[in-house]
Image: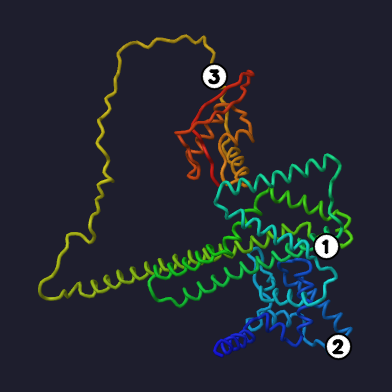
């Protein structure tokens, strides 16, 4: 009985405060859900500027009033937007992007859940079960193999997979090649499209968590009266808890995977290939799916900017606290000066303290220069003799200039796809053009870069061909550049 009462009280509170439940219970829920689905979910749009969403909402209201009558929806589009984005509704998030002064609107995670639930009530024309069953089997296989610590068992499983691949190759060479049926193609495509669109909702959820953390930090800073160390410990603990959570780790792994240029090109190629299949064309898919990974990038960048704003808020708090402490010190010094001036002509009676200097002299031993023997120049007596000027001076003028900025650009380009690269891989991608001078320039960059590692215990060899056509080779320590 107590558990039932607890569940009832929790659900009653959820019905009052949760934006998704309030949206479903709203008087004009069909109007709100229909418009937000058409404006955000259906086109897979992350956010809309105010003028654009106002135009869409006015068109939507115009068509509804034509059908329901002019008295159906009396409020203006601007009033509806302000109401939906208010703190009492929280169905839309109104914010100002860093690059402009026009407000933008985005769905809140609660609103997106409510819209997805409503859309799921309609009967689907095609319910795919095979693709989801295959997904279950694939996930179970990954879990079983990924957690297997016995080497022999993992090797045996890989050998089974190799045998199946060899059998498929033999079947194809013998002319027996199985191709997916149109039903299987449509089943898998619909599941892929739904998953791809749902990723934007995941980004909204992650970004909302960081925004909640940012808001709580601002509130805590505004009302904090304790020590600065205690506040920073609490804030960084909450930030690390989100970053180290399963959701945070999954988001970071997804972001690292998506930031790879090779993966982006592979996604583009796969999407173009799949959308050109005849069974998929029969479904008349939304062509905007071709750019869905760019929508993911934009949504991920917004989540990263939210994290950067949280760091900026902490840095501003530290700067403000330092300024306050300096101001307090100056106030104390000013007070001492004022008291000293007030008693200058009438010093207090009795013993009086005297000091030699107003401030101590600090002499740090490490600031003292070390003793060095004076250099005694050696001057040789004798007449200067003129030298022989008949020699080739081309070597003094034939010097090669190595552009270090161009070499840094090459390193940054390769580090976009990999977390670390060796000097040997770098030279393989960009062959040496200036020979030994370019090798020395790379070593100089590695010595200046804190992220680079020069390992003297290992060696690597670099080869190039000079201007005379001779192959040169240099053996040098193992150099690795890190992102």
Circle 1 Cα neighbour tier, 10 Å, few/some/many (<14 / 14–19 / ≥20): few
Check disc 3 and report the residue beneath it.
395
Q: Mark 3 touching mark 2, by CB under 8 A?
A: no
Label of residue 70 in the image: 2
Q: Secondary structure at mark 2?
A: loop
Circle 3 Cα neighbour tier, 10 Å, few/some/many (<14 / 14–19 / ≥20): few
Q: Secondary structure at mark 3?
A: helix
Spot occupied by residue 206 in the image (x, y as percentages of width and height): 61, 67
For the point 54% across and 13% down, the residue is: 392
Looking at the rendered image, the quarter that the N terminus falls into is bottom right
Check disc 1 and report the residue beneath it.
286
Q: Secondary structure at mark 1?
A: loop
Label of residue 43 in the image: none
Q: Which of 318/340 is in front? A: 318
Q: Mark 2 touching mark 1, by CB under 8 A?
A: no
Q: Is residue 110 left or right of residue 52?
A: left
Spot occupied by residue 298 in the image (x, y as percentages of width and height): 68, 60
User: In the rendered image, which quarter is residue 332 located in?
Assistant: bottom left
Say which of marks 3 and 1 sits in front.
Answer: 1
Q: Which of 24/454 is in front? A: 24
Q: Is 287 located above or below residue 330 in the figure?
A: above
Separation of disc 3 and disc 1 at Cα?
Answer: 66 Å
Q: Is residue 47 left or right of residue 477?
A: right
Spot occupied by residue 80 in the image (x, y as percentages of width and height): 74, 82
Q: Farthest residue toward the left?
A: 350
Give whichever of discs 2 and 1 has the lower sequence position. 2
Q: Which of 269/369 is in front? A: 269
Give whichever of discs 3 and 2 has the lower sequence position. 2
Separation of disc 2 and disc 1 at Cα?
Answer: 34 Å
Spot occupied by residue 146 in the image (x, y as percentages of width and height): 60, 54
């Amino acid at each position: 009985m107590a558990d039932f009462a607890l569940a009832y009280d929790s659900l009653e509170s959820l019905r009052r405060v949760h934006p998704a439940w309030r949206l479903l219970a709203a008087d004009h829920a069909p109007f709100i859900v229909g418009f937000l689905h058409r404006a955000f979910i259906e086109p897979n749009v992350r956010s809309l500027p105010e003028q654009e969403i106002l135009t869409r909402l006015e068109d939507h209201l115009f068509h509804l009033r034509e059908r329901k009558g002019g008295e159906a929806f009396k409020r203006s589009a601007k009033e509806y937007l302000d109401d939906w984005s208010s703190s009492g509704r929280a169905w839309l998030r109104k914010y100002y992007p860093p690059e402009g002064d026009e407000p933008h609107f985005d769905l809140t995670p609660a609103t997106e859940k409510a819209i997805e639930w409503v859309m799921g009530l309609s009967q689907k024309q095609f319910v795919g079960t095979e693709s989801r069953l295959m997904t279950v089997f694939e996930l179970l296989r990954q879990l079983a193999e990924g957690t297997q610590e016995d080497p022999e068992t993992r090797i045996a499983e890989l050998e089974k997979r190799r045998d199946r691949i060899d059998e498929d190759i033999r079947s194809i060479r013998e002319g027996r090649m199985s191709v997916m049926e149109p039903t299987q193609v449509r089943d898998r495509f619909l599941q892929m499209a739904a998953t791809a669109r749902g990723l934007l909702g995941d980004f909204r959820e992650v970004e909302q968590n960081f925004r909640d953390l940012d808001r709580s930090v601002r509130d805590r800073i505004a009302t904090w009266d304790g020590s600065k160390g205690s506040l920073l410990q609490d804030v960084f603990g909450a930030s690390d808890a989100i970053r180290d959570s399963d959701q945070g780790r999954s988001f970071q792994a997804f972001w690292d995977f998506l930031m790879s240029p090779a993966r982006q090109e592979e996604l583009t190629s796969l999407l173009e290939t799949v959308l050109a299949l005849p069974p998929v064309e029969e479904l008349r898919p939304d062509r905007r799916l071709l750019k869905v990974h760019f929508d993911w990038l934009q949504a991920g960048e917004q989540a990263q900017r939210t994290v950067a704003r949280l760091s900026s808020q902490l840095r501003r708090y530290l700067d403000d606290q330092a300024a306050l402490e300096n101001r307090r010190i100056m106030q104390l010094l000013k007070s001492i000066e004022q008291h000293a001036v007030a008693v200058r002509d009438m010093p207090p009676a009795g013993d009086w303290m005297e000091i030699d200097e107003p401030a101590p002299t600090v002499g740090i031993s490490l600031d003292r220069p070390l003793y060095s023997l004076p250099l005694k120049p050696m001057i040789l007596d004798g007449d200067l003799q003129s030298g022989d000027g008949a020699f080739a001076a081309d070597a003094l003028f034939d010097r090669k200039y190595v552009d270090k900025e161009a070499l840094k650009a090459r390193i940054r380009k390769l580090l976009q796809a990999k977390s670390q690269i060796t000097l040997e891989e770098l030279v393989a991608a960009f062959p040496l053009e200036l020979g030994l001078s370019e090798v020395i320039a790379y070593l100089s960059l590695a010595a200046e870069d804190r992220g680079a590692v020069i390992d003297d215990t290992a060696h690597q060899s670099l080869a190039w061909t000079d201007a005379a056509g001779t192959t040169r080779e240099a053996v040098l320590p193992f150099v690795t550049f890190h992102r």
